[in-house]
Amino acid sequence: MLTALAGGVGAARFLDGLVAVVPPEQVTTVVNTGDDDEFHGLWVCPDLDSVTYRLAGAQHPETGWGLAGETFHTMGALARYGAPTWFNLGDRDLATHLYRTQRLNQGASLSEVTAEIVGAWGIRSRLLPMSDDRVATRITVRAGGPDAATEELAMQEWFVHRRSEPPVVSVRFEGAETARPAPDVLEALEMAETIVVCPSNPVISIGPILAVPGIRDVLTARRDRVVGVSPIISGRPVRGPADRLMGPLGIEVSCVGVADAYREFCSTLVIDAADAALAPEVEALGVRAIVADTVMRDARVAATLARHTLAAVA
Ligand code: FO1
């Protein structure tokens, strides 16, 4: 049994490689739901959907989110009514949001609906939301000069609508204190031979998962079984805004900064060959460094990376 912690697009690529080297039935992924939000009255779970579509081989090849071959006629039609369409929901993607919203309104839990959606896509590994309770990533920014007022934005407002441009002052996960791990999450972490922290944004993808009471404690107790993959290579994220969040929060934007952020619960960190010279600094933090090719150009590289990652704590 192997359990992974995942955010969105970067994690999805890695998971695709993982289920190529480990029987999918043995893989459980705990997915971030801090990015979830309501659009046009529909409940959207971007990271659950990015992982689902990727594992189903249906993801949009360029963006990594949404579906391949997607059209946006509904967004175009909504624009006629002056509805905000900055969050691009494709016509086929909307079916997922319509179905999920209807099932939630019928009283189903997010875990139950996720299992139905994952099953419908024929995915054999298990996807669990980190919690069935609402946890909302909120980002405080200072829009303007150093003495400008601060403003708190919902994650998608900052990331998509404002293109992650406003400088970040702080991040919080509203609701985390009272959120409970979704059913089977703690058990999946306790029973796993290996726990993998996927190459996702340490602050807004892995952070919310760790903020759900109980989850971080299990990883810390099982630290020797926990291996992470650095999402930062040569001081930059492979994609996404991790650097714009880590810097302001005092986390060095490097694989060493990731090792420092994860050292309490993660015994081993896989870093990219480009950062081989930083291995001693990672190890000085008490985290074993494994050097590998972590740029997942294709499924073969992702599978090789998954193999290295698992071998690291075998
Ligand atoms: N990201 C964008 O940059 N622009 C979008 O219009 C956009 C729409 C979208 C729709 C559905 C979905 O599941 C994801 C979408 N994303 C979009 C990506 C999303 O903001 C991120 O994948 C996660 O929230 C962060 O990993």
Image (cartoon, helix red, strand yellow):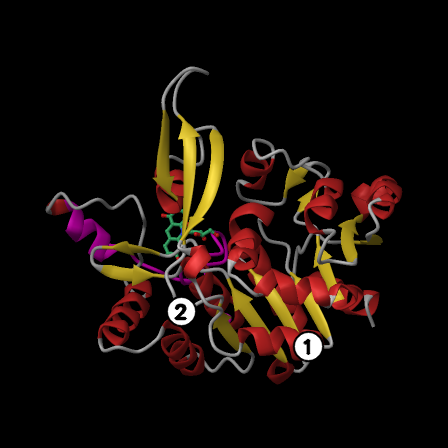
Of residues 282 and 39, the one drawn nearer to the viewer in this rendering: 282
Residue 68 shown in magenta: yes
Residue 40 appears in the picture as rendered: yes
Callout 1 crowding tier (Cα within 10 Å): few <14, some 14–19, many ≥20 = some
Whether 166 is drawn above or below 42: the answer is above
At 25% from the left and 61% from the top, the residue drawn is 42
- To which residue does mark 2 refer? 132
- The residue sitting at 82% across, 69% down in the picture is 311
Q: Which one is in front, 68 or 264?
A: 264
Measured from the top left, where is residue 54 in percent x and y? 51, 66
SS majority, magenta: loop
Q: Give whichever of 64, 47 is nearer the camera.
A: 47
Give residue 262's mark.
none
Q: Quarter of the image for the N terminus: give it.
A: bottom right
Which range of residues does the magenta coloring cover? 57-79
Name the residue located 53 percent from the left edge and 40 percent from the top edge.
241
Residue 4 located left or right of residue 291: left
| 122 over 245 or under it: above or below | below
Query: Could you say whether the residue bearing mark 2 is in a helix, strand or loop?
Result: loop
- As measured in the structure, the alpha-carbon distance from the residue carrying label 2 to the one carrying label 1 is 21 Å
Q: Is residue 154 above or below residue 90?
A: above
The answer to which image quadrant residue 157 occupies is: top left
Residue 32 lies, in percent from the top left, at 49, 60
Q: How many marks?
A: 2
Regarding mark 1 in the picture, which secondary structure is present there? Answer: loop
- When asked about the image quadrant of residue 101, the answer is bottom left
Ranked by sequence position, the earlier of labels 2 and 1 is: 2
User: Which image quadrant for residue 102?
Assistant: bottom left
- Residue corresponding to mark 1: 192
Residue 89 horizontal/vertical position (percent) = 31, 55
Relative to 203, residue 114 above or below:
below
**Amino acid type for the residue under numbered disc 2:** Asp
